[in-house]
Structures are given as C-alpha cells and as structure tokens.
Image (cartoon, rainbow, N blue to C red):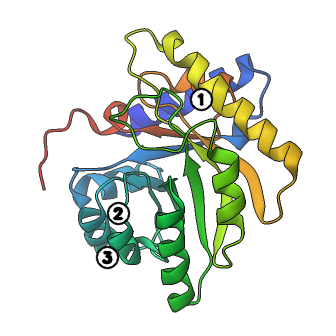
Amino acid sequence: MRDRIQKIEQQIRDAAEKAGRNAQEIRLVAVSKIKPASMVKEAIIAGQTLFGENYIQEAVAKVEEIGGDEAQWHFIGHLQSKKSKYAVGVFDLIHSVDSLKLATEIDKQAAKKGVVQNILIQVNTSGEESKSGTTDETVIALIREVAALKHIAVKGLMTMPAFFDDPEGARPYFRQLRLIKERINALAIDGVEMRELSMGMSGDFEVAIEEGATLVRVGTAIFGARDYTV
C-alpha cells in the first residue's frame, strides 16, 4: 500500500508541475468506503492521513474505532438530511451539500453541538439525473442562501463528472467547476471561501489537477477493487 500511495503522490506532483501549480495546494483523499478499518490503519502506517467515506453508519463506526487524532475524515457521499446529525462535528469537511434543506439541517445540528461545520457545495456538472448536486444555473443562489446560515462555512465546490474511458472526456466538467468557482469568487459573498475544488478520482485525477482540483478522491488505486461489504 505504501508503494501505491507514493505512486499517486508522485502523479499528483507531476500533474501539478505540468499545470504550473504548487503540489502543496493539492490533497489526496483516500476513499475508504466499504473497506475495513484494518486497511485504513494500514494506509495510516503508510503515511496517508486524509480519508473519505460515503456511507454514514459505516463511516461513523470507522471514525470511532480509529479516531481523529491519527486521521482526518471527509464525508463525500450523498447525505440525507435526517442523518446529518451523525456527520456534523465528526467530519472535518462534508463535500456533498446540494440543497438548502440539507444545509439548514446541518446548520441546526451544528448549532446544537456548538460547532461550525465546513462544507462544499456539490454541483452536478454532467446533468445526469443519477447524480446529486445543484446546477450551474442555481448554484450561486444556493450559496447565497447557505452563506446566511451561522453554523456553516462554505469552503468550495465538489463535482462528479460522467464516466469516460478516456480521462480527457471529464476535462470539460472539471473546467466548468473551476469557472463556477471563479464566478463565485468575483461576487465576494460574505462567509464564502472558494478555497477547495473536490474533483477527480482514480481514473482522471491528473486531468482534474490540471483544471484546478485541490482535493482528489482516490479509492481503487489505493485500496483495490471493492471486495468488502458492510
């Protein structure tokens, strides 16, 4: 696993150099969904400290077993409003906020716990009905509404493009998210910090980096195929 992680880190550095970017701006999120805690511990020993989880009950159990001292945790999957109470204050960043309803519930739960929850707004750049996310046309209005909530901090955007055998096929969707970020930055909305772009996975993260990704979500290339069920 150490070799796989080091290989990906080198690919991140190479992609950053190609794009004229500082590789220190880009973080690797090791997607550990449906992988046992033992594999996460192995990755920690190998030097990986940031992990992404998709399923809230599995994720909370893993966080409780491993803790937050040795690892940082991001929630990257679809989050139901009624389950947001399990995520707030547990995850350093929630990538997948796509509605005012969900944001309002996160804000409510964060107020109860006396914390400010960092989030990303998920944008459905591909237009696929199977994918969650607000749209290019509605994202700014949503961000303005979310920014008014006192216990949420908007840190950037996330997207999941359509799947392509050729990673170049995903480039327009990554570029679209970067352009949305630039539009939002130009508006200088109070309480909104467009610092993060979460985009790119095992098959296309290098292209995502070239288009501005700061968080790349890599699972299969680190942990292998999904062969563990919860």
- Badge 3 is on which residue? 64
Q: Kindly indicate whether the residue at mark 1 contacts the one at mark 2 (C-beta within 8 angstroms).
A: no
Q: Is residue 191 rendered to the left or right of residue 128?
A: right
Q: Nearer the viewer, residue 7 or 171?
A: 171
Q: What residue lies at 58% left-to-right and 17% top-to-bottom? A: 171
- Badge 1 is on which residue? 12
Looking at the picture, how far across and down is residue 113, in whole percent? 51, 89
Q: Is residue 228 rendered to the left or right of residue 1?
A: left
- Badge 2 is on which residue? 80
Q: What residue lies at 32% left-to-right and 49% top-to-bottom? A: 32
Q: What residue lies at 53% left-to-right and 44% top-to-bottom? A: 134
Q: Amino acid at mark 1?
A: Ile
Looking at the picture, how far across and down is residue 7, in whole percent? 47, 28
Looking at the picture, how far across and down is residue 215, in whole percent? 58, 42
Q: How far, Cα to Cα, is label 2 from label 3? A: 20 Å
Task: Determine the secondary structure under disc 3.
Answer: helix
